[in-house]
Image (tube, rainbow, N blue to C red):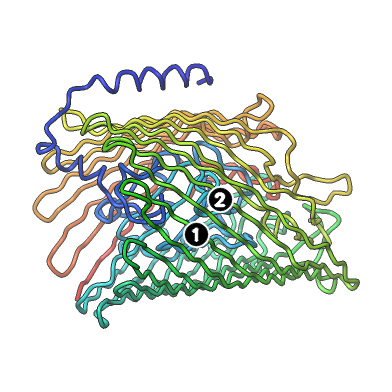
Amino acid sequence: MNRSRLRAYAALCLAMGLSGQEPGLDDLADLKATLDRPIAAASKRLQSLKEAPADATVLTSLELQEMGYRTLADALEGVLGFRTNRDRAYAGLGARGLYVLGDQNTRVLVMLDGHALNGPAEVGSSKVGEDFGIPLDFVERIEVIRGPASTLYGNNAFLGMINVVTRTPRDHASGETLLHASDNRTGALDAQIGGATGSGGWNLMVSGFQRNGTETRFPALQATPLAAGLDEESRQSAYLRFQGTGWSFLGYAMKRDQNLASAPFFSQVGYPGTTYQNQLAFADLRLEPVFGPVETLARVFGDWNQFSADYNYDGIRQPSTAGLFKETDPDRGVGLELQARTPVGERLFVTLGSEHQWHHYHGTAGIDPALVRTKVQHQIGNTYVQAEWQILDTLNLVAGLQQASWSVQSASSETGVRQDFPSSTLSGLTPRFSLIWQPTSVDILKLLYGGGYRNPTIFERYYADGSSFKENIELRPERIETLQGIWASIWPIGLRSQLSWSSSRWTRLIQPVTLPSGFQQFQNQGTELHGQALEGELQGNWPGWTAYLQAGAYDWTQNGIEMPNTARFQAAFRLTRRWEGWSASGEVQRVGSRSNAPVGVTVPASTLWRASLRREWAKAWLRLSLEDAGSRRQDLVATDYDPIQKMTWDGPVLRLTLSLRF
């Protein structure tokens, strides 16, 4: 669908929207409640979905439990505007039809109860698969925002953001244990326990996951299938949350080990020692005192991220390289955020905030003894102001501005001889504007404009391994501008609809380039990307039934040529039936074909479906789920897998989950 047709269709839909007859909301309470769902991510404060200055979707705990989603990636597959791209190591996250091949989810901000999980090193920073580590059956809601949100969050909130909100600690002792088993050689044990403490409560979640692997085939490299054990995976995680009046504390730790049959970065296929390991931990203390009409926030936090990898190079796929390769990329940091929200008159509120982080990165990569040691000490800054003005009872204006910065105090690389890089500072202003109009009690119109800002990662700017990658200290931040128009409405026939159109301009895209020397180096692209999207949602609620349909048409071009790995069309349909302690749910997902023209490869469109049957009792529940049934989906992969150009999903999975409450 070309841009002129997208614009014409959007204008026609918006023109038709305001002519509908206003239904009685008493008869459509469930649909009205959908627009009143709480969301905290849009403005860093709790508000309803209809008043949030964002194009947003909220998934509730009931929807997550009834559909039986195991991972965050599973849940996002059915959300408007998002899809995953899987290379058998990580689940990459694409937004509005596009996933940039090789991206480690650096362009979508993923948060857990408001704490960012994206790290500044970003090597292996997926965190939407099993490495997310939080059982979705223990989640209160998932807040999804389409479009840039950098004005409040700075780096990484570039194409969108995800905030996963866990269950609020209870004021009484309780617990729950989940047992999972499936026919694809996987199993998991999740548990949650909580209780009261003073004026608040606490929750502790622990989770363990084991996948023994499946046979994999890579005809471009090996005719026979690889043994299942070469693809095994395990993960352990724990999350502690305390909450009281005006304060909260979060603590999290996760460790994931992944064997790699897929052999990335031109390593030896079938070598049993090819592994990835991700470790993540954070602590976050928040104080939220109220001084008269002024609401404040003081937050102190610390993060530790580490990615490790082992490969064997046999000199075949990359003739100049042979030997055992090891890599370790640890980054640790501390941060402070201060925020105040104050009224200025009766209808104007102003939010001022500033967040600063101090990080130390010390990475090692290469073939022993020629190891490259890289050290970077750096600071990340984010200062923002946002004004919310209620012009009329039915008309709100939100405007904001952010100053983002990345300051490198010292950086060096050492391979026998030390090389010092100059200190530097990258910065930029990011605006935000939204106009929200409610012309009737059942119609909402939003006009949104926002900018996105993404610094280069440590990996992109400073990574060097002596054999395949070279640093580029000249990298500049990526920028994006997005204009969106949204119309949401409730109809007399028991339906809620939403239509949106967006246009984006993306500059300084960072991608790897092969140099004449054979090394790869990340560089800013000199030409802009232009994106267009037309998206729609339709939801129906009737006694005992819920139906949901979403679809999006997308167009991403660079120099008038379609961007690699763009899905021009995505859609999903979900249906749930509830009766007397039972629920039955089904979901069908459709993703259009995607191509990578520079290397002449295309993966076909796919249709996947899942089904879930759940039985609820007072102290237990049982769920049987079928996942990834239908056509075997394929995803394109980055050039470091050559001559592998696409990966095939494993296929249908039958999963049984038993919950016991106490």
Residue at 42% in and 74% down: 238
At mark 2, the secondary structure is strand
Image: 18 above or below 72 = above
At mark 1, the secondary structure is strand
Towards the viewer: 82 or 598: 82
Residue at 41% in and 19% down: 9
**Which residue corresponds to mark 1?**
353
Q: Residue furthest right?
A: 417
Would you say 14 lies left or right of 400 here?
Answer: left
Would you say 291 lies left or right of 511 here?
Answer: left
Would you say 573 lies left or right of 457 here?
Answer: left
> Residue flagged by tag 1: what amino acid is it?
Gly
Residue 36 percent location from the top left of the image: 25, 46
**Which residue corresponds to mark 2?**
402
Q: Residue furthest front?
A: 345
Among numbered discs 1 and 2, the one appearing first in the sequence:
1
Image: 559 above or below 191 = above
Residue 513 percent location from the top left of the image: 77, 44
The Cα–Cα distance between marks 1 and 2, rounded to whole angstroms, is 9 Å
Mark 2 crowd level (few <14, some 14–19, many ≥20, 10 Å Cα): many
